[in-house]
Image: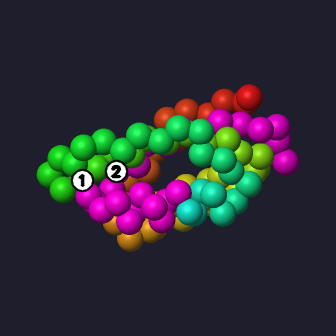
């Protein structure tokens, strides 16, 4: 395990609030705590979600989490836009 870190993601999804809900459940299922969440207005039936979460998971676990989010129905793109230790 590493020290707690803050991970920031930019996620493009279809315009469906249920997708956002599934992403949050997936993140909360691990050793993570959502710190910020912003869901943008839909443009061309797609929505940008930017979120940051605090985690005590290892980097390999974070990569696996990101891959799992990428493979979720309704998710178009996931980009890690930041990572820093607390």
Q: Which residue lies most toward the right here?
A: 1
Query: The magenta stretch spans which residues?
Result: 1-24
Query: Is 69 within the magenta?
Result: no
Q: Which residue is mark 2?
A: 12
Would residue 81 appear left or right of 75 to someone viewing this image?
right
Local crowd at mark 1 within 10 Å, few (<14), some, or many (≥20)?
Answer: some
Answer few, some or many: residues within 10 Å of disc 2's Cα (few below 14, many 20 plus, some between 14 and 19): many
Indicate the position of residue 19 as horizontal and vertical percent values. Answer: 39, 63
Of the residues under marks 2 and 1, which one precedes in the sequence? 2
Closer to the camera, 65 or 55?
A: 55
Q: Are marks 2 and 1 in contact (CB under 8 Å)?
A: yes
How far apart are the two marked residues, 2 and 1, measured between alpha carbons? Answer: 7 Å
Residue 40 percent across, percent down from the top left: 30, 42
Badge 1 element: strand
- Residue at 42% across, 58% down: 20
Image height check: is 65 above or below 86?
below
Q: Is residue 16 left or right of residue 59?
A: left
Q: Residue furthest bottom?
A: 73
Q: Quadrant of the C terminus?
A: top right
Can the viewer see residue 60 in this picture?
A: no
- Front residue (pair 65, 16): 16
Q: Residue at x 53, y 57 (%)?
A: 24
Q: Is residue 43 left or right of residue 21?
A: left
Q: Position of residue 54 (x, y in %)?
A: 67, 41
- Position of 8 relative to 19 (above/below): above
| SS label for mark 2 | strand
Magenta region includes residue 18: yes
- Residue under circle 1? 46
Taking the spot 66% from the left edge, 63% from the top edge, the residue there is 29
Residue at position x 77%, y 46% from top? 56
Q: Nearer the viewer, residue 83 or 23?
A: 23
Please indicate, yes or no, whether residue 55 appears anywhere in the rendered image.
Answer: yes
């Amino acid at each position: 395990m590493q020290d707690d870190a803050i991970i920031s993601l930019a996620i493009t999804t279809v315009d469906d609030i249920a997708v956002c809900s599934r992403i949050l459940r997936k993140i909360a299922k691990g050793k993570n705590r959502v710190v910020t969440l912003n869901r943008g207005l839909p443009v061309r039936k797609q929505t940008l979600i930017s979120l940051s979460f605090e985690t005590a998971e290892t980097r390999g676990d974070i990569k696996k989490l990101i891959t799992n989010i990428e493979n979720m129905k309704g998710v178009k793109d996931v980009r890690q836009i930041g990572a820093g230790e607390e």
